[in-house]
Image (tube, rainbow, N blue to C red):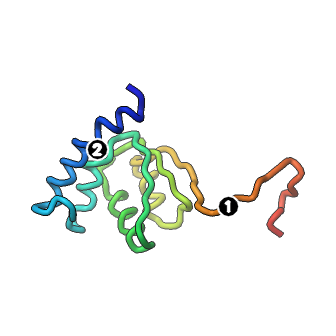
Amino acid sequence: MSNTSRLGADRAPRLAQAAALSGTSGKICPADRATLLLEAIIEPRDRVAIEGDNQKQADFLAAALAKADPARLHDLHMVQSVLALPDHLAVFERGIASRLDFAFAGPQRPISNSTPACWWT
């Protein structure tokens, strides 16, 4: 089964696990259960982007992921714009994540063989 097919097949069980942790509403997870929620819906070797509507939410999610049990979550592929917080590094130090790709939302300047080493100066 391709990775895309696996993700589609896994979606319903993951959402059911999230609803079980979220209580009666099934849509809002209490903050004290955030790490449990991430452990329930993220599988080893998943690609994960920690983002929020604002920096405070992104920081909260990064801290919740850093508290996860490495026996439960490991070998994650993180996609982030920057490693700015201790929690961003902790997921690698604790063995929760093993791969990192950087993603940027803004335009990127093409780099060619003729670009000087210090093109930003």
Q: Is residue 18 left or right of residue 108?
A: left
Residue, disc 2: 72
**Residue plotted at (84% across, 57% down):** 117
User: What number is the disc on residue 107?
Assistant: 1
Of 72 and 78, nearer the camera is 78
Q: Are marks 2 and 1 in contact (CB under 8 Å)?
A: no
> Residue drawn 55% across and 60% down?
81
Q: Secondary structure at mark 1?
A: loop
Which residue is at the front of the view, 4 or 32? 4
Image quadrant where residue 5 sits: top left
- Assign the C terminus to one quadrant of the image: bottom right
- How packed mark 1 is, by other alpha carbons closer than 10 Å (few <14, some 14-19, many 20 or more), is few
- For the image, the number of numbered tags is 2
For marks 2 and 1, the one nearer the N-term is 2
Residue 7 quadrant: top left
Q: Position of residue 68 (x, y in %)?
A: 31, 54
Label 2 sits on a secondary structure element that is loop
Rendered view: 113 above or below 55: above
User: What's the amino acid at mark 1?
Assistant: Pro
Q: Residue at x 52, y 57 (%)?
A: 80
Q: Give x and y (percent) for residue 85.
A: 48, 67
- Quadrant, the N terminus: top left
Tell whether 85 sits left or right of 21. Answer: right
Spatial separation of the CA atoms under disc 2 and disc 1: 37 Å
| Residue kind at label 2, given as amino acid type | Arg
